[in-house]
Amino acid sequence: MDRIRRLPTGVVWALGTLPLALLVWDTLAGNLGIDPVRDIEHRLGRTAVYFLLASLCITPILRMARVNLVKFRRPLGLLAASYAGLHMLSWAVLDMGLLWSQMLKDIAKRPYLTIGMGVLVILLVLAATSSNAVIRKLGPVRWRAIHRWVYLAAPMAVFHWLLAYKIWPGKPLMILLAVAVLLAFRLPLLRRRVGLRAGSD
């Protein structure tokens, strides 16, 4: 863990481009499934959820393992927002052909699209307010209030995933459970218990 802590954030950015590079390779090589558009959309969306989940792991790792990986939270969150944006862009361009009126109708009509759009808006707001300049302008109290919306975006993202499949497959259910556990660490009582336990070790 200490070696990971010493890594520069550039490593996270470099690793964060790998899923996109693999997707581009698979697309060009014809390695996608029978519905390439769906595969592109779903892979980008899943990757956004994975990076969002990784960003939520930072605080529990700090509290339980006493390893400070906080410097990686910003790039992980920005990667999550970037892949969420690409996920939406692939749907808008490849699936809907930029038919804006039909897109708006579908977003209003289909719950999974409504939820997904809500997640994207939250992540884009968080990305736009993540720079040091904006943090100074907002102040720490207002900035933290804004960034607590990630606790809503994470479960919403998984519900979007589940509803998009129209079934409840195992992987997103496991991700939903992981999100619930990670969010539980934000509960005051559990935070005190973990802190006391860690202090006695």
Image (cartoon, rainbow, N blue to C red):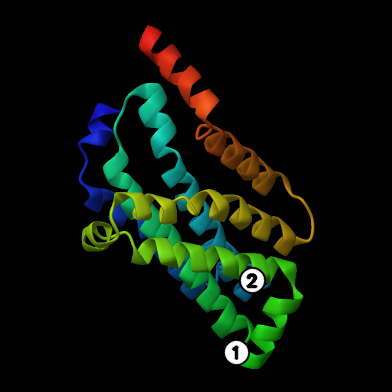
Of label 1 and label 2, which has the lower sequence position?
Answer: 2
Give the quarter of the figure containing the C terminus.
top left
Secondary structure category for the residue under label 2: helix
- Residue 125 image offset from top left, x and y in percent: 42, 66
Note whether 186 is above or below 148 in the view shown.
above
Give the quarter of the figure containing the N terminus.
top left
Which residue is at 61% across, 75% downward? Answer: 37
Name which residue type carries label 1: Gly
Res 179 label: none
Quarter of the image for residue 62 reads top left
Which residue is at 58% across, 38% downward? Answer: 178
- Residue 20 image offset from top left, x and y in percent: 42, 64
- Residue 154 image offset from top left, x and y in percent: 55, 51
Note whether 167 is above or below 30 in the view shown.
above
Instruction: Decide which of 176, 118 is in the foreground and name it.
Output: 118
Callout 1 crowding tier (Cα within 10 Å): few <14, some 14–19, many ≥20: few
Residue farthest right in this picture:
167
- Residue 191 image offset from top left, x and y in percent: 48, 26
Quarter of the image for residue 131 reads bottom left
Res 38 label: 2
Which residue is at 73% across, 68% downward? Answer: 111
Note whether 4 is above or below 22 in the view shown.
above
Asked whether residue 56 appears in the rendered view, the answer is yes
Callout 2 crowding tier (Cα within 10 Å): few <14, some 14–19, many ≥20: some
